[in-house]
Image: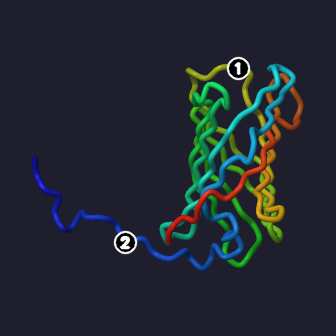
Amino acid sequence: MQDISDDCTDMRLLPMNEVLKPLAWLKGTWRTKSPGAGKYPTIQPFRYCEEMSFSSIGQPMLNYSALSWKPDEKTPMHYEVGFLKIIPDTNKVYMLLSHNFGVTTIEEGVVEDKIIKLKTTHIGRPTEGTRRPIVLELRRQFALVGDCLEHTLYMATEDTKLQEHLHAVYIKKCETDP
């Protein structure tokens, strides 16, 4: 087995980029305080646990991931990864996300105090391999309420109008570095 050269040892993480100050309250790992609630007219109501992470490596965006699982079976449900960016010197933000069910989204919105409101401006999907119904719109809100993070997701599909799909309350699990 070959050794790793000194040039390829661990990357040096930089402090959080100054442009992210309005989003600094999100930084960390958040886990559902108790199971979240999922509902939609075309499915049975369900509960879920989730862990969300907002981290920084010093670039002008927060890295984001969210993994959800069934509370009783402890089996995976949904996974999404991406980036949360803020347009410098404004309160405008956007998220670039890739979902494990075959959809990518660009969600744009604003941050005001400790609330982020986002709405899809683009949804991409492969020409084959995704199941119906097709998602047409997502809206979401992240809100810091006390020391808890609330996340609500609204969804519209080709069969249903925009309505609440997911809601959960999270507590901060740990601080991320740097």
The residue under the point 50% across, 68% down is: 177
Q: Nearer the viewer, mark 1 or mark 2?
A: 2
Counting residues from the start of the chain, the first of labels 1 and 2 encountered is 2
At label 1, the amino acid type is Arg
Give the residue at x 34% y 67%. Answer: 11
Confirm or deny contact between disc 1 and disc 2 (CB under 8 A): no
* Location of residue 26 in the rendering, given as x and y in whole percent from the top left corner: 68, 64
Q: Residues within 10 Å of mark 2 (few under 14, many from 20)?
A: few
Question: For mark 1, what is the residue?
Answer: 132
Residue under label 2: 12
Q: Is residue 167 left or right of residue 173?
A: right
> Which color mode does the image show?
rainbow
Above or below, comparing residue 35 to residue 148 in the picture: above
Q: Residues within 10 Å of mark 1 (few under 14, many from 20)?
A: few
Between 60 and 66, the one lying in front of the other is 66
- Counting from the top left corner in percent of width and height, residue 67 is at 60, 41
